[in-house]
Amino acid sequence: MNLRYLRWLLLGCVPLGFVLPWIDSRPVGLPGDVSLPDAVAAFAATVVFGLLLTSAPPKRGSPVEGVSRRAAAFLVDGLFLATMSPGLAVMAAVVTHLPSGTLAGVFVLLPANAGDIVISAIVAALAAGFPLLYFALPLARGKPTPGTCVMGYVVVRDDGARLGFAAAIKRTLLAVVGLMVWPVALFGWQSSRGKFWWDRVLHTGAVRWT
């Protein structure tokens, strides 16, 4: 699907995740005590995210100058992740179902059992891996994240080649470290080339898509 059409779908999914829960926020028996509006919004956001991953590679334009566009993209990505998060609660609840035999949410205190440590490790891995894959998968495939798609740019290698999954994971982790100490992230920002310091480490940059 063309990125121009996906941009409008993405813009619709973000408010969907915040408007629908106002309709009815009561749990309806879904795994993880997720309400039906939350589940609908999460499903819609996940489908659009999948369409983004399988979309045609964007044509690359000029470098993104200034940090405001990239900051706005990160905000949109955060909102989109929040919209998709009920799906994570459902997956984690299904994991708890395996040893307990009951579909109870991960936020509900369950009686202790022998498999709790294993379950906790799996749920923690899901919670940590989900945001990581959210950013790394589009990078590895040469596609924008939902936030960068809305803001009209994509992060690519300087030589035009695909970043690769291992390098995408590394870049995502470096970006997390950089954002945890955000004043340091702005140090050395190269406005004319659209680069943070982690971009320079992995020879990547933000360019507009057309």
Image (cartoon, grey):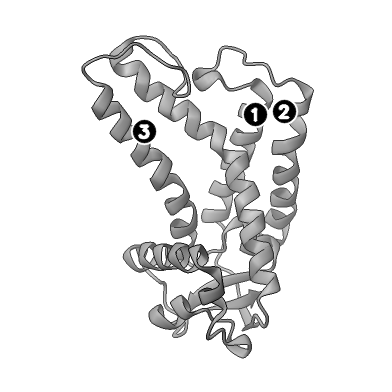
Q: Which residue is disc 3 drawn over?
A: 123
Quadrant (top left, top right, bottom left, bottom right) of the C terminus: bottom right
Depth check: give the residue in front, 168 or 186: 186
- Residue lying at 47% horizontally and 49% vertically, measured from the top left: 131
Where does the image place residue 183, in percent across and percent down from the top left? Answer: 56, 73
Q: Quadrant of residue 203?
A: bottom left
- Residue lying at 64% horizontally and 70% vertically, measured from the top left: 70
Give the secondary structure at mark 2. Answer: helix
Instruction: Single out the residue that lies furthest toward the bottom.
Output: 192
Q: Which residue is disc 2 drawn over?
A: 21
Q: Amino acid at mark 1?
A: Asp
Tell me which numbered mark, 3 or 2, is placed earlier along the sequence: 2
Q: Amino acid at mark 2?
A: Pro
- Residue lying at 55% horizontally and 69% vertically, measured from the top left: 182
- Residue lying at 48% horizontally and 23% vertically, measured from the top left: 107
Where does the image place residue 129, in percent across and percent down from the top left? Answer: 39, 47
Dot in front, 1 or 3: 3
CB-based contact (under 8 Å), mark 1 and mark 2: yes
Q: CA distance from mark 1 to mark 3?
A: 20 Å
Q: Which residue is disc 1 drawn over?
A: 38
Q: Amino acid at mark 3?
A: Val
At label 1, counting other C-alpha atoms closer than 10 Å, the crowd grade (few under 14, some 14-19, many 20 or more) is: many
Please give left or right for residue 138 compared with residue 45 in the image.
left
Q: Quadrant of residue 106?
A: top left
